[in-house]
Amino acid sequence: MPRILVIQPDASDPVGPLGDWLTAAGAELDIRQPPGDELPAGLDDYQALVCLGGGMNAEDDSAHPWLKPVRDLLATATHNGLPTLAICLGAQLLAVATGGRVVQGDKGPEVGAYLVSKKDAAWTDPLFAELPLMPDVLHFHEDEISRLPANAVLLASAPKYVNQAFRLGRCAYGLQFHIETTPEVVQSWAEDEPDMAATAKPGTFETSTLSRLHEDLADTWQPFAARFVQLAGGALKTAAPTPRNTLPLA
């Protein structure tokens, strides 16, 4: 039974269905919500790391000084080859921790149901290979990963913001989008961030629309979560080593 450390940076973004999918696949979760919950000093007791989303900026250390220890853990996991899944803010933290750059998106917020497109490298990736060409995702962010870390492998893209999913090393993954939400969580975000919500398409936050979206998300991403547990447990091989390069690989 792989033991997974789950870091929840924000009370508004719990692990949700993703947690159910991970445990159904055989994982044990240790959920920590800083700053109330102390973060472990290291990762020796875990077989994988998950970092969720949040409303803060990835480098807002003055308001959230515990962000640096989170970035340090993400950097350590990547360096040590620990299977890692970082979502939205988590992906931004992973990028910054390993040499990438995050800025406020110059095309405005990306909010609502979208499709992202798999890149060529995704078809041979252990987690992404079985996803459809254009999987459903949920966006709710205004910052973007403007530059991926060196030697990152770009796995999925979209017209508005290019860097939607990437892999570092053999098994550290960043997703700029959400797969862990429920309709109620998304509606609460819309209430808390009305200016961002106003940029979405009409009807985006209706319960029926969100319910259909989340059924599609479960169809696509529950098997993905199960593969992540297999990766953590050693039943699934990690990706081949990334050739050394100075630019993200597509």
Image (cartoon, rainbow, N blue to C red):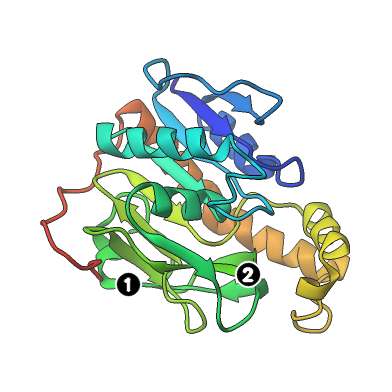
Please name whichever residue, 157 or 128, is drawn nearer the observer in this view of the structure: 157
> Is 234 left, or right, of 145 in this rendering?
left
Q: Where does label 2 land, which residue?
A: 142
Binning the other alpha carbons within 10 Å of mark 1 as few (below 14), some (14 to 19) or many (20 upward) gives some
Q: Where does label 1 land, which residue?
A: 119
Residue type, label 2: Glu
> Is 123 left, or right, of 205 in this rendering?
left
Q: Position of residue 46 (x, y in %)?
A: 42, 21
Residue type, label 1: Lys
Q: Position of residue 239 (x, y in %)?
A: 23, 47
In the image, what residue occupies the spot 81% across and 65% down? 193
As displayed, is residue 239 above or below residue 189?
A: above
Binning the other alpha carbons within 10 Å of mark 2 as few (below 14), some (14 to 19) or many (20 upward) gives some
Please name whichever residue, 72 or 196, is drawn nearer the observer in this view of the structure: 72
Residue 199 visible? yes
In the image, what residue occupies the spot 33% across and 59% down? 129
Q: Position of residue 59 (x, y in %)?
A: 53, 51
Quarter of the picture holding the N terminus: top left
Q: Position of residue 79 (x, y in %)?
A: 26, 36
In the image, what residue occupies the spot 21% across and 68% down? 247
As displayed, is residue 224 above or below residue 159?
A: above
Q: To which quarter of the image does residue 111 belong?
A: bottom right
